[in-house]
Image (spheres, helix red, strand yellow):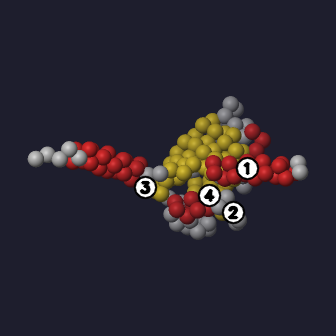
Amino acid sequence: MTYPIIKPLTTAWLIGFVLIAVLFLTGCETDYYAQFPDRHGQAKVSISLKPEYLDWALELQGLDMITMVHIHCSPGDYIGVTFNTVFNLTQDDGVSIKGTALTPDKGNFCGWLTMKDVKASMDAGNAYVNVHTYSQPKGATRATLTSLSMLNKERWDRFFERLNDNR
């Protein structure tokens, strides 16, 4: 005797299992954005905790001889994650650079041991991207990393401030 409910239940269970497996294997990324002042470009940092990695993409322009790019923590302005790639180029029209970091820098003074620590600092608004150039070794431009939810919160805060000002 066959029960008609068995086949739909088995199918639903199989679909659920596949979705959970795909979610577990791909992990969940959180995106953070930074807009550099003076139209020097932008950065996007995506961080995943399972597995742990940090993907970054930079679009830079108007900077001469970029030597290094880092994520710094604040307060303290210490280097926490180095974007390892070759930057020793002069960019007239701009450059797009991508890469991946698997761990924070060893021995950093930010106290970041895992990507979870980096993510917590970014969530708190205590991390920024710093672009170093040959002529400005301490940093030519910097921008705070912000999540979309923080960007939206700031937009709504400004909206409510304007409402209160119009009373």
- Residue sitting nearer the eye, 156 or 93: 156
Q: Which mark is residue 122?
A: 4
Q: Residues within 10 Å of mark 3 (few under 14, many from 20)?
A: some
Residues at circles 4 and 3 in contact by the CB criterion of under 8 Å: no
What kind of residue is marked 4?
Met
Mark found first going from the N terminus, 3 or 2: 3
Residues at circles 1 and 2 in contact by the CB criterion of under 8 Å: no
- In this rendering, which labeled residue sits more in front, label 3 or label 2? 3
- Residue sitting nearer the eye, 152 or 123: 152
What kind of residue is marked 3?
Pro
Q: Residue 74 carries which label?
A: 2
- Residue sitting nearer the eye, 10 or 54: 10
Residues at circles 3 and 2 in contact by the CB criterion of under 8 Å: no
Task: Report how far apart the C-alphas of labels 4 and 3 lie in the structure.
Answer: 18 Å
- In this rendering, which labeled residue sits more in front, label 1 or label 3? 1
- The residue pinned by badge 1 equals 156
